[in-house]
Amino acid sequence: MNIDLSGKKIVVTGGAGFIGSNLCEVLVEKNNKVVCLDNFATGKRESIAHLHENPNFKLIEGDIRNLEDCKNAVEGADFVLHQAALGSVPRSINDPITSNDVNVGGFLNMLVASRDAGVKRFVYAASSSTYGDSKGLPKVEDVIGKPLSPYAITKYVNELYADVFAKTYGLETIGLRYFNVFGRKQDPNGAYAAVIPKFVGQFMKGESPTINGDGNYSRDFTYIDNVIQANLLSLVVDKPEAINTVYNVAYGDRNTLNDLVGYLKDYLSEFDASIKNIEVEHGPNRVGDIPHSLASVEKAKNLLNYNPQYSLQQGLKEAVKWYWENL
């Protein structure tokens, strides 16, 4: 990934999380000063442990719900990559208040702190959940439906706030609507684990994963390196029409959960042949889930020069190898 970005001070909120820790790693490698702000509610200390010895990396253990923590983190920063959030549709359904406090209140704190510190650009993790009950495929950025979960509401509110801060205060913002991101460092454990690491972990233990529904729901699964590329491009793009807007970040293809399970069995069975024979189980559909998701990535290609390199199959091969070596 040859994107010229060095010598900047960049804040990564949620920098110990799945996406955030991968971003911190790449930015440090590119010779930037990186500040990681994380309260470790979902982030993992081990994901950033190897960065502490680098003088260009700084950890601030704090909470985006605390404005002073936000101001402390962004002091003197050129850019913010805002990844901190409480993810998961089911979590937001079980506890909408905390999801709102973190995802909306914390987001607003980071916007205010960034505005006051003179940050040049604020790039934030938006979500494909914003498309809600919109039926059309592929999803295009300017056509959305009504949100189907508290989580989806919070992520849409982020976009509205970012737009207002761009227009009112001149803060440059770019929102990246992530579609089902997966890859190295994604936690396979816990009540709200994403489907790919959860299934990998279960297969590796010889357990049968449970698919919600008949397995014919489909998703635009997006490997972590595609997401890193989109974030870096969002920091360096200088075309006015590319700023103060939102982009889909995906591969631009969809696979069913049944397809996904088939690929996982194939790739994992290269390490343990018995995995090929593990049967999956089926449970009820999950509340708040949309049946199908597929992104158009034309806008990101045209304005950001986004060029996703990893299909689901290519990304799964990399992810499976990482899990086998690290779990």
Image (cartoon, rainbow, N blue to C red):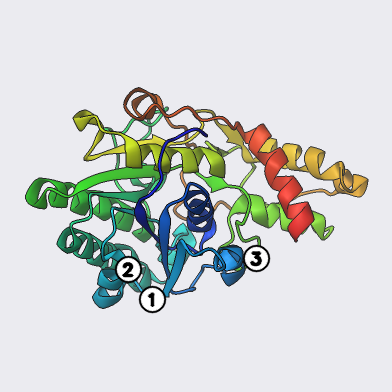
Identify the secondary structure beneath mark 1: loop
Q: From mark 3 to mark 1, how far is it between C-alphas?
A: 23 Å
Q: Are marks 2 and 3 in contact (CB under 8 Å)?
A: no
What residue is rendered at 28% in x and 33% in y? 143
User: On the picture, is 55 further left or further right than 233?
Assistant: right
What residue is rendered at 51% in x and 37% in y? 226
What residue is rendered at 22% in x and 60% in y? 114
What's the residue type where badge 3 is placed?
Asn
12 or 227: nearer the eye?
A: 12
Density class for disc 2 (Cα within 10 Å; few <14, some 14-19, many ≥20) is many
Instruction: Tell me the number on the disc at residue 172.
Output: none
168 or 235: nearer the eye?
A: 235
Identify the secondary structure beneath mark 2: helix
Q: From mark 2 to mark 3, how far is it between C-alphas?
A: 29 Å
Q: Residue 300's quadrant in the figure? A: top left
User: Image quadrant for the C terminus?
Assistant: bottom right
Instruction: Tell me the number on the disc at residue 62.
Output: 1
Which residue was labeled with disc 3?
A: 189
